[in-house]
Image (cartoon, helix red, strand yellow):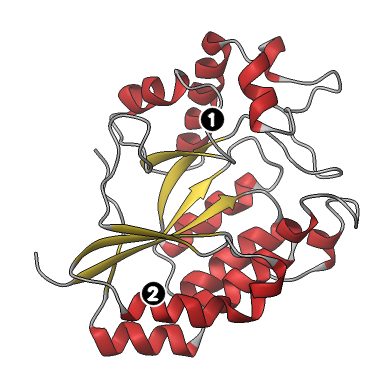
Amino acid sequence: MAGVRLVVQADDLGMCRAVNEGVEVATTDGILTQVSVMAPTPWFAEGAAVARRLGLATGLHCTFTCEWDFLRWAPLSAGPTLRLDDGTQPRRVEDAAAQIDPAEGLAELQMQARRAQACGLELAYVDPHMGLSVTSAYPAICDELGLRFIYKGVEPFHRFDSMHVLSLSSVDDLSQRTGRFVDWLDQLDDGRHFVLSHPAVASPELRAICEPDAPNVDWAERFRAADLEALTSPEVRAVIERRGIELVRVSAG
């Protein structure tokens, strides 16, 4: 099929209210086409309702980590290697990889998938939160669900002609994020392309999830608000319409 097709994905649905709101705005006022859902998180039930109401394609965002100081969530299953002493998930991918028993990891993903399905979601793909940790669990859950992974490194995976991570820029580049996204869109060749984003509305809630000097503080609000601004930008919409870019989602299987 000739032409430029664009999958626009948001991560972290369910993490908090500001993320759920950001996903909704990025869909109704922007170009979002699919969203990855975090079943263990505190605002997941509302996030699932948002996804259902908007008709968004959803993917299982395999969640073995919880990176925030004050927004903490626990695994859904009982495996002792899945949690820290306080019962919540490890903070870093490398910590999860070092401590989680693969069988307990797969059991956790099975529980996460069941919760997503019980909340009325039809999963279309699988991907990781923060990175790959329990490496054997990802292909196993893909096989059980009959789905493909979004990224290379886990078979089977979805293939794209290019990928753009909207969220990856330094704080100094925040003001240029939308412009760089427009430039990338303007240079796309025919094929299926992929954009990863983390939209959220700016809010006191996001500013409260970690210490103000935490290493990941810019991921709390600043990067997410900038992603939402880019996804809803009139300049982005204009280049998509001018070039006839088709906004699409991945299909299950």
- Separation of disc 1 and disc 2 at Cα? 35 Å
- Badge 2 local density, few (<14 within 10 Å), some, or many (20+)? few
On the image, the x and y values in percent for residue 118 come to: 49, 35
Camera-side mark, 1 or 2: 2
Q: Where is residue 108 shown, x and y percent of the image? A: 56, 21
Crowd rating for badge 1 (residues with CA inside 10 Å; few <14, some 14–19, many 20+): many
Taking the image as drawn, is residue 193 in sight?
A: yes
Instruction: For the C terminus, give its image quadrant.
Output: top left
- Corner quadrant of residue 55: bottom left
Image x and y of residue 72, in percent: 79, 38
Numbered disc total: 2
Query: Which quarter of the figure is the N terminus placed in?
Result: bottom left
Q: Earlier in the sequence, mark 1 or mark 2?
A: 1
Residue found 59% across the figure and 78% down from its top: 229
Mark 2: secondary structure: helix
Q: Is residue 94 left or right of residue 145?
A: right
Q: Which residue matches tag 1? A: 112
Type of amino acid at the residue the image marks with label 1: Gln
Q: Which residue is mark 2?
A: 184
Residue under the image location 39 percent in, 63 percent down: 33
**In which image quadrant can residue 88 be found?**
top right
The answer to whether mark 1 and mark 2 are in CB contact below 8 A is no
Q: Nearer the viewer, residue 236 or 20?
A: 236
160 lies above or below 119: below
- Which residue of the protein is positioned furthest toward the left in this rendering? 1
The answer to whether residue 116 is left or right of residue 209 is left
* Apparent side of residue 54 relative to residue 200 in the rendered image (left or right): left
Is 64 rendered above or below residue 103? below
Q: Position of residue 92 (x, y in %)?
A: 70, 33
> Element under label 1?
helix
Instruction: Return the mark for residue 183.
Output: none
Q: In this orientation, which residue lies closer to the viewer: 101 or 108?
A: 101
